[in-house]
Image (cartoon, rainbow, N blue to C red):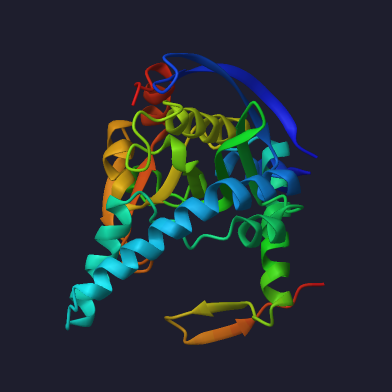
């Protein structure tokens, strides 16, 4: 069962006013249905268009073609068009090692996050200490500037990262947090104050970011407004 | 429960946080064993490798 963690007012660039959102711990079936019906048709259509565009360019080199597709998916705001949230969430729904969160606004699913509480830190100063690892984080297509301008809500990323830091604090991990970033989000995590440890060869070369306890505390004090 | 206090201090966790973490570790290992994976302890210097069997 989802637990309501809190209600907040976030800026809506689209509507030019504050909108009330709710954040819940626990992604349930109705949330997954919302993601599948509201997010995925948009993301899959954009992914398909990006793939078609790359195919038409007839790039001979496999590596160059793969990179061009990744770039096109980033540019169209759908690098996660292949994610299956149901498949990610349901196997760990009852797990004490994972925690999931969902943000809603008037019945619409605005953002979702899945965390793993069994990972270890990589920064030398906190090497092997327990961290909260953000496995997956995404906002709805209409909250992405690449998909819709002006977007519906602004500040969802900060809200979810603050939620993840709070979970880390609650678990006694002192705010330590880690994640692998999709290319389009690297600037966001750097601006949050996370340390960029560079590309991870063991994780599709995505860059790995981590918060120390001091960085997490600084973030909670001033999360920024992007 | 001296061991609980010692481990909690070593990991910088409260005792309840340590117990939650132990449960997570046990659950994670069980999930992987259920998938058919096996758990080993390895000493590279002595070239020893032992399978850890959970009860």
Q: Position of residue A80 (x, y in %)?
A: 44, 56
Please indicate whether residue B8 sits to the left or right of residue A3 in the image: left
Q: Nearer the viewer, residue A91 or B52?
A: A91
* Res. A74 in view: yes
Q: Which quadrant of the structure image shows residue B9?
A: top right
Q: Quadrant of the N terminus of chain A?
A: top right
The structure residue drawn at horizontal position 45% and vertical position 27%, both measured from the top left corner, is A153
* Res. A172 in view: no
The structure residue drawn at horizontal position 69% and vertical position 54%, both measured from the top left corner, is B24
Q: Nearer the viewer, residue A202 or B43?
A: A202
Q: Which quadrant of the structure image shows residue A187?
A: top left
Q: Which quadrant of the structure image shows residue A71?
A: bottom left
Q: Position of residue A214 (x, y in %)?
A: 38, 28
Please indicate whether residue A206 sits to the left or right of residue A116 in the image: left
What is the residue that sits farthest to the top in this orientation? A17
Q: Quadrant of the C terminus of chain A?
A: top left
């Amino acid at each position: 069962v989802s637990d309501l963690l809190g209600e907040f007012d976030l800026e809506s660039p689209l509507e030019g006013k504050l909108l009330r959102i709710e954040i819940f711990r626990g992604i349930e079936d109705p949330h997954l249905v919302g993601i599948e019906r509201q997010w995925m048709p948009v993301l899959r259509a954009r992914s398909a268009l990006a793939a078609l565009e790359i195919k038409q360019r007839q790039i001979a080199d496999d590596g160059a073609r793969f990179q061009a597709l990744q770039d096109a998916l980033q540019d169209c705001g759908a690098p996660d068009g292949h994610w299956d949230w149901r498949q990610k969430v349901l196997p760990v729904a009852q797990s004490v090692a994972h925690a999931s969160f969902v943000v809603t606004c008037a019945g619409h699913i605005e953002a979702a996050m899945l965390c793993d509480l069994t990972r270890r830190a990589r920064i030398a100063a906190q090497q092997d200490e327990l961290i909260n690892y953000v496995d997956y984080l995404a906002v709805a297509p209409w909250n992405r500037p690449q998909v819709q301008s002006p977007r519906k809500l602004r500040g969802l990323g900060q809200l979810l990262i603050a939620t993840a830091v709070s979970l880390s604090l609650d678990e006694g991990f002192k705010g330590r947090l880690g994640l692998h970033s999709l290319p389009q989000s690297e600037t966001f995590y750097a601006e949050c104050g996370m340390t960029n440890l560079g590309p991870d060869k063991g994780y599709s070369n995505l860059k790995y970011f981590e918060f120390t306890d001091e960085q997490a505390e600084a973030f909670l004090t001033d999360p920024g407004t992007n | 429960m001296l061991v609980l206090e010692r481990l909690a201090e070593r990991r910088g966790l409260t005792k309840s946080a340590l117990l939650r973490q132990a449960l997570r570790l046990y659950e994670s290992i069980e999930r992987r064993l259920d998938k058919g994976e096996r758990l080993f302890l390895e000493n590279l210097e002595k070239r020893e490798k032992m399978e850890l069997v959970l009860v």
